[in-house]
Image (tube, rainbow, N blue to C red):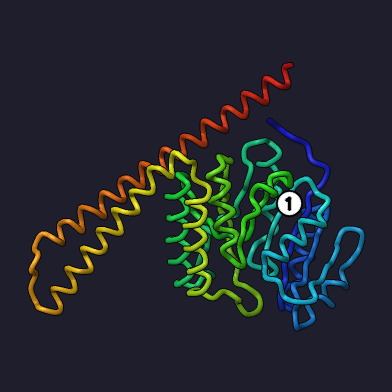
Amino acid sequence: MERDFASISLIVPAYNEQEAILPVIDEYYPYVDEIIVVDDGSSDETYVRACTRVDAKVKVYQHAKNQGKVGALRTGVSHASGDIIVFTDADCTYPACYVPEMVRILKEGKADLVLGARLEDRKNIPLFNRIGNTIFSSLAGYISGKIIQDAQTGYRAMFKDRIPMLDVTAKSLEFETKMTVRAAKLGYTIIEIPIVYRERVGVSKLHPIRDGTRMLRGLVSIAWNETSPLGKMILAPSISFVIIGLLFGLYSLYERFSVYHLNHEYFPMIAIFSVLLGIQIFSIGLVVDYLTKKLDRIEERIFSLNEKKN
């Protein structure tokens, strides 16, 4: 169903981005109705420089202490007046020219969440980050039952009334991944549009190991917390089979490297069989959960249509 919106708000979390903040504001200015910059306790001139662009359209807020990207995003959303919220980073990596297409998709009712997927000209993404992005996006797609090519992108647009449902517990860059998976688990329609990812201005704040670990924990958390009770009943034994298989496998390795031969030759077979069985049951659990959520979503829509008729 096509919907009309009064305005579009852009949220720009910024931490020590004095070199990039003004170009970001200037580039997005023609495409949105409101720009909200949240300086997250920067130690440089980010806040001072952003304030030079303050007018009826540009608003700048400041955290006295660094609260992390998630805190800055929440502050921005709390002050936003637009019906559509667009998130972007303050490092000049995401081109503003994609905003009209993202908004059009939302207005036409084709999606609840639009992602700017970094699929074109990826040379500006470090190789290690590219590998990590592929792995975590694949895991996110596997867990959610949908094809997701860039679950980690910080360039996204959604209905403002969807944000409370998609606001997840997170500290840093795992926020985007958890939000994407939660949207998929809730049955929301997600559309990715390919974008060019430009070279960042300034120093990257990404810590691959730390942030990667947080993303992995976040995926596990969402996979469990957002799974239906029926899905959990199926997933629980699958985890047990995987653990049993790993224990048999580790014991076989211990025997192989300590006494140089296997006293229990059938243990490796048990290990492989248990792990594969666990993965198969896990997959079935995800499919059941996906179908359950899909049926719930259909039921909600039917109930909503009946209310409108009455």
Q: Which residue is mark 1?
A: 85
Between 117 and 303, the one nearer to me in the picture: 303
Residue found at the very far top of the displayed protein: 310
The residue sitting at 82% across, 47% down in the picture is 7
Give above or below for 221 relative to 251. Answer: above
The location of residue 212, given as percent across then percent down, is 49, 69
Give above or below for 98 relative to 3. Answer: below
What kind of residue is marked 1?
A: Ile
Q: Is residue 265 left or right of residue 68?
A: left
Between 269 and 46, the one nearer to me in the picture: 269
The residue sitting at 67% across, 67% down in the picture is 69
Residue found at the very far right of the displayed protein: 56
The residue sitting at 62% across, 59% down in the picture is 169
Between 95 and 231, the one nearer to me in the picture: 231
Give above or below for 271 relative to 235. Answer: below
Q: Residues within 10 Å of mark 1 (few under 14, many from 20)?
A: many
The location of residue 62, given as percent across then percent down, is 81, 71
Pick the quarter of the image with the N terminus. top right
The residue sitting at 75% across, 70% down in the picture is 23
Q: Is residue 126 left or right of residue 157?
A: left
Residue found at the very far bottom of the displayed protein: 43
Q: Is residue 120 left or right of residue 45?
A: left
